Amino acid sequence: MRQEKKPLILIGFMGTGKTTTGKALARRLGLSLVDTDREIERKTGKRISELFREVGEEGFRDLESRVLKQVLAETPGVVTTGGGIVLRPENVRLMKETGWVVALYASEDEIVRRLAATSDRPLLEGDVRQRVARLLRERRGLYDFAHFRVDTTGLTVAEVVDQICRRLPEDRGFKLDRSRPS
Ligand SMILES: Nc1ncnc2c1ncn2[C@@H]1O[C@H](COP(=O)(O)OP(=O)(O)O)[C@@H](O)[C@H]1O
Ligand SMILES: O=C(O)C1=C[C@@H](OP(=O)(O)O)[C@@H](O)[C@H](O)C1
Ligand SMILES: [Mg+2]
C-alpha cells in the first residue's frame, strides 16, 4: 500500500479501539503513526489525567486542537485521535478536508467492558457505566461525518484492520497492495 499525502484518521468514542487498531493498521500498511493523546503527553511531559487536573477540559481541548493541526501539517500516515476531538467544529473541518476519516463504533456494553480495566481516562472517573452512557448520549452523531464507519463490536483488532484496508479508496491516494497478507 502506498499513501500519497492523505493521512488516514481514526475517530470514535473512547474504547472503540482507535489507539490499538491504529497501531496494527499502520504496521500492516507500512505507514507512520501518531496518536494525538501520546503526542500531547510527549510535548507536555504530562499524563492526560494530570493535564485535565491542571488545565481543565477546555485547556486540554486547546492542546488537542493545536496538536491536531501540527500533526496533520506534517502529512503523516495514520493518525489516531482522542474521543473528544470531534467536540470542536474546527477539528472536524480540518480532519474532513485533510484526511480520509474512519469512525470506529462499538456497543455501549462492549465499550464499558473494554474500558473497565483501563486507566487514565479522566472523564470516566467514578461509575464508568454511567459516565459512558451519558457521554455517548451527549456525543451522539458527532462521529458520523466520517468517510466510512466500522462497528467493532465482536470483532478482533485484526478483523477491524481488514475491514478498513478493504475499503481504502484508491482514487483518494491509497493504493492497497493486495499481495500482502492480512
Ligand atoms: N476490537 C477490539 N476487541 C477487543 N478489545 C479491543 C478492541 N480494540 C481495542 N480493544 C481494547 O479496548 C481497550 C481500549 O482500546 P484503545 O485502543 O485504547 O481505545 P481508544 O483509543 O479508542 O480509546 C484496550 O484495552 C484494547 O486492548
Ligand atoms: O473522549 C474524550 O473526551 C477523551 C478521550 C481520550 O482518548 P481515547 O478516546 O483514546 O480514550 C482522551 O483524549 C481523553 O481522556 C478525553
Ligand atoms: Mg486512544
Image: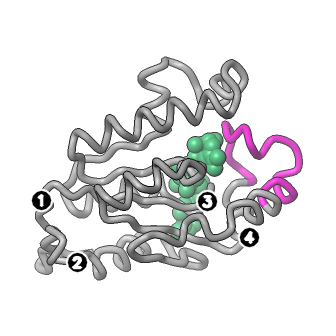
| Residue at (67% x, 29% y) in the render | 49
In 3D space, how far apart are the residues under numbered discs 1 and 2 (Cα atoms)?
12 Å
Q: In the image shown, does 41 or 148 lie closer to the viewer?
A: 148
The part of the chain drawn in magenta is: 116-132
- Mark 1 — residue? 4
Q: In the image shown, does 61 or 52 lie closer to the viewer?
A: 61
Q: In the image shown, does 3 or 160 lie closer to the viewer?
A: 3
Q: In the image shown, does 150 or 142 lie closer to the viewer?
A: 142
In 3D space, how far apart are the residues under numbered discs 3 and 2 (Cα atoms)?
24 Å
Q: Secondary structure at mark 4?
A: helix
In 3D space, how far apart are the residues under numbered discs 4 and 3 (Cα atoms)?
10 Å
In 3D space, how far apart are the residues under numbered discs 2 and 4 (Cα atoms)?
30 Å
- Mark 3 — residue? 13
| Residue behind label 3 places its C-beta within 8 angstroms of ligand 2 | yes
The colour scheme is: one colour
Q: Quadrant of residue 160?
A: bottom left
| Residue at (36% x, 39% y) in the render | 69
Residue 112 has which mark? none
In 3D space, how far apart are the residues under numbered discs 4 and 1 (Cα atoms)?
36 Å
Label 3 with label 2: CB-CB less than 8 Å:
no
- Mark 2 — residue? 169
Reading the chain from its start, which is encountered first: label 3 or label 2? 3
Residue 163 image position (x, y, % from top left): 37, 79
Q: Secondary structure at mark 1?
A: loop
- Mark 4 — residue? 108
Categorize mark 4 by other alpha carbons within 10 Å: few (<14), some (14-19), many (20+). some
Reading the chain from its start, which is encountered first: label 3 or label 1? 1
Q: Quadrant of residue 34?
A: top left
Categorize mark 1 by other alpha carbons within 10 Å: few (<14), some (14-19), many (20+). few
